[in-house]
Amino acid sequence: MLNIALPKGRLGNKVCKLFEESGFKFPGMLEPGRKLIFENENLNLKCFWVKPFDVPVYVERGAADIGVSGKDILMEREPDIYELMDLNVGICKMCVAALNNFHDNPARTLRVATEFPNIAQKYYSQTGRDIDIICLRGSLELAPVLGLSDVIVDIVETGTTLRENNLKVINNIADLSARLIANKSAYKFKSEIINKILKGLSEYKKL
């Protein structure tokens, strides 16, 4: 049995549909309810929902053989896994954003609000900028508006929320999308079925 971890939420629903359209179906997985584990006994596959930030943990520690994780989470957590494929769904960017009238003053410490402290730290360490990271969980746009931070480091999809709060993107850090990942041991010992899934997904993407 190959165990597959998918992220709960909108991205997970898109990925689940991608798996189904590629020939790997899990009956009932997209139906409303609290059930977390679904099996396809004919294909010897088991799929389960987990919180997006936890997918790499399940895969790295072997509870899942493969999984789907956003590139943002992989950059933040840096798990010891194999990244097998860019699924080209959940496409967005990791950006630095600030108020429209923001002007940086290099003489003072830059206050950075983010859900991704490791990404922010690495980005600014490359420039030698002195920063103070403020870890928040959601509604990051409020931080510069209320004077809590100078900038935010966050995921930007359309930019609508930024514009509606008088913010703008001032730097792009990375392009993001969903990635198929694998446990290193599982990739070695379950390579046949993993490669079958890779082939199915690749062929569907070419259609």
Image (cartoon, grey):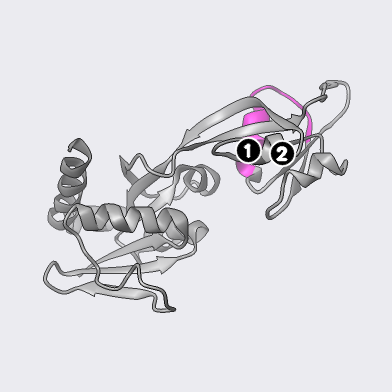
Looking at the image, residue 24 lies above or below residue 34: above
Using the rendered view, name the quadrant where residue 7 is placed: bottom left
Q: Are marks 2 and 1 in contact (CB under 8 Å)?
A: yes
* Residue 191 screen position, x and y as percent: 17, 53
* Residue 159 screen position, x and y as percent: 61, 35
> How packed is label 2: few (under 14 Cα within 10 Å), some, or many (20 or more)?
few
Looking at the image, residue 135 lies above or below residue 111: below
Using the rendered view, name the quadrant where residue 97 is placed: top right
Task: Between residue 152 and residue 190, name the one nearer to us.
Answer: 152
Q: Quadrant of the N terminus?
A: bottom left
Q: Is residue 100 left or right of residue 80?
A: right
Q: Quadrant of the C terminus?
A: top left
Identified at 52% across, 57% down, the residue is: 53
Q: Is residue 16 left or right of residue 166?
A: left
Identified at 32% across, 58% down, the residue is: 16
The residue tagged 2 is 164
Q: Is residue 34 left or right of residue 96?
A: left
The residue tagged 1 is 160
Dot 2 falls on a residue whose secondary structure is: helix
* Residue 96 screen position, x and y as percent: 66, 32
Could you tell me the amino acid type at mark 1?
Thr
Farthest residue, direction bottom: 34
Mark identifier at residue 9:
none
Task: Between residue 57 and residue 153, name the one nearer to us.
Answer: 153
Identified at 11% across, 71% down, the residue is: 42
Identified at 83% across, 40% down, the residue is: 145
Task: Magenta stretch: give its range.
Answer: 118-131
* Residue 202 screen position, x and y as percent: 20, 41
Compute the Cα span from label 2 to label 1.
Answer: 6 Å
Could you tell me the amino acid type at mark 2?
Glu
Task: Between residue 85 and residue 21, name the one nearer to us.
Answer: 21
Looking at the image, residue 132 lies above or below residue 129: below
